[in-house]
Amino acid sequence: MTSAKATVDVVVLTMNDRPEPFRRAMASLLAQQGVDLRVVVVGNGVKPHDVPDGVVTVALPVNEGIPAGRNVGADALAGPDAGEFVFFLDNDAVLPTSGTLARLVAVARRHPAAAYIQPRIADPDTGVTLRRWMPRLRAGTATRPGTITVMAEGVVLIRRADYEQAGGWPGHFFLFHEGIDLCWRLWDLGRTGYYAPDVVIHHPATDPARHASFYRLVARNRVWLAYRRLPAPLIPVYLAVWTVVSIARIHSRANLAVWFRGLREGLKGGHGQRRPMSWTTVARLTLAGRPPIV
């Protein structure tokens, strides 16, 4: 364990469609103390606007999707001067105090086996932590720390060495479930994740189903995730479990029809490289509280 100040590479994406939240996010980020920051803003299909001085920018000619954009940002800060950590921050999230990021780094140094540290995400107005922001199956309380097997991708700290060894985000997923794919690869390296609820970061409580492509992409990417990362005998189990869960959760016939179209799209292929986790990793994930079929 070291007390030296950490260098943190921070990746923020923008489509220039949230000017006020983006300005607040950047102001809170650049106010951080106790860490050395290197920040990149990636414009997904745009040239980033209102970027503070000293921040690196990358403009992608088209919207490549969130995981691909994050990879581009992390790569832009790679090399011999790369930070010890990479911090991925949604452009409408706010670090509420100037010591928030330093506290998150301190948690990482207290838990060296953890490749990624997940803070508690809370709505700035209500203080509520949404169920989807709690990275565990048993989510009776948002304030219980401990080992986790998944992440809330929009606000997470990852060790640069682990991120690069795992291969980064699955860029072609475009949106949804890219965090599970990355987590499973990190766990397959023998690493873990840790949830630090005492470190709170603010994020508006929005509904992901507001995206027109939500039901199609969540279904397609579930299939891709299974084909990419699971041992062959677990693939049909995983897909059967999520089909049942989705039918129970999706009450609109129209939305369910879109979900099944996404499922069929995923079954047709396009998942990319297949690199299934080991059975040892299956056992570790299960012992950690989340077998890789749910």
Image (tube, rainbow, N blue to C red):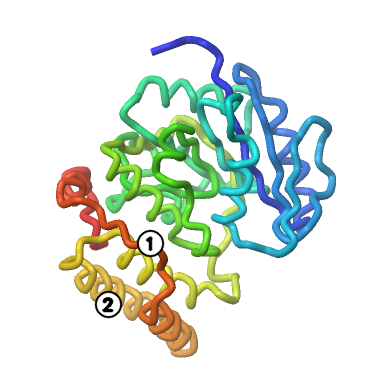
Label placed on residue 73: none
Q: CA distance from mark 1 to mark 2?
A: 27 Å
Badge nearest the viewer, 1 or 2: 1
Quadrant in which residue 262 is drawn: bottom left
Rendering quarter of residue 66: bottom right
| Mark 1 and mark 2 residues within 8 Å of each other at the beta carbon | no
Q: Position of residue 241 (x, y in %)?
A: 24, 71
- Helix, strand or loop at label 2? It is helix
Q: Is residue 113 above or below residue 170?
A: above
Rendered position, 156 above or below 15: above
Q: Percent position (x, y) of residue 153?
A: 49, 49
Along the line of sight, the residue nearer the viewer: 191 or 259? 191
From what the image shows, is residue 48 above or below residue 199?
below
Q: Residue at point 71% right, 64% down?
A: 62
Where in the figure is residue 108, as x and y percent of width and height? Answer: 42, 26
- Helix, strand or loop for disc 1: loop
> Would residue 215 be found to the left or right of residue 10 on screen?
left
**Along the polypeptide, which appears first: circle 1 or circle 2?**
2
* Amino acid type assigned to the residue bearing label 2 in the image: Val
Residue, x 72% and y 56% (percent of image)?
Answer: 60
In the rendered image, which residue does mark 1 sit on? 273
Label 1 amino acid? Gln
Give the residue displayed 29% in from the left and 40% down from the top. 189
Which quadrant: the N terminus? top left
Front residue (pair 270, 36): 270
Within 10 Å of the Cα at label 1, are there few (<14), some (14-19), or many (20+) other Cα atoms?
A: few
Query: Residue 286 vs residue 154: left or right?
Result: left
Which dot marks residue 244?
A: 2
Q: Is residue 145 left or right of residue 231?
A: right
Quadrant where the C terminus is found in the figure: bottom left
